Image: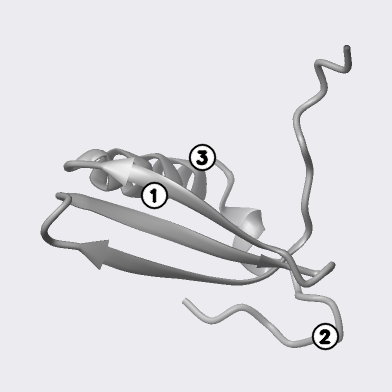
Amino acid sequence: MNSAPARYRAVSMWFAADLDAHNVEMRILADNGQTVAIVCPQDSIFTIQKQIEQMGKGCPEIATWSRVGGARLRR
């Protein structure tokens, strides 16, 4: 049994809120055409947001990295 996590190269990411189910889905389109949906129940999406902000503060050079094809990420 392989214990390594599945790895995908994201080409797009968006969020969808399900107000009835009280969750937010983070949908990621991979370079292989597959869409992966991560369900964030209740307010856990805000924990993810805080972790992303902390990563940006702890490792600000991430903002200088470029996308494939040379397009810069916008902040």
**Amino acid type for the residue under numbered disc 1:** Glu
Give the labeled residue for mark 2.
Answer: 70
Tell me: 34 left or right of 58.
right
Which class describes the residues within 10 Å of circle 1: few (<14), some (14-19), or many (20+)? few
Q: Secondary structure at mark 2?
A: loop
- 1 or 2: tag closer to the N-terminus: 1
- 3 or 2: tag closer to the N-terminus: 3
**Amino acid type for the residue under numbered disc 2:** Gly
- 3 or 1: tag closer to the N-terminus: 1
Give the labeled residue for mark 1.
Answer: 53
Specify the label residue 58 is tagged with: 3
Percent across and percent down for residue 62 are: 64, 57
Which residue is drawn at the image coordinates 77% and 72% (left, top)?
A: 33
- Give the quarter of the image for residue 31: bottom right
Closer to the camera in the image, 53 or 41: 41
Q: Secondary structure at mark 1?
A: helix
Which class describes the residues within 10 Å of circle 2: few (<14), some (14-19), or many (20+)? few
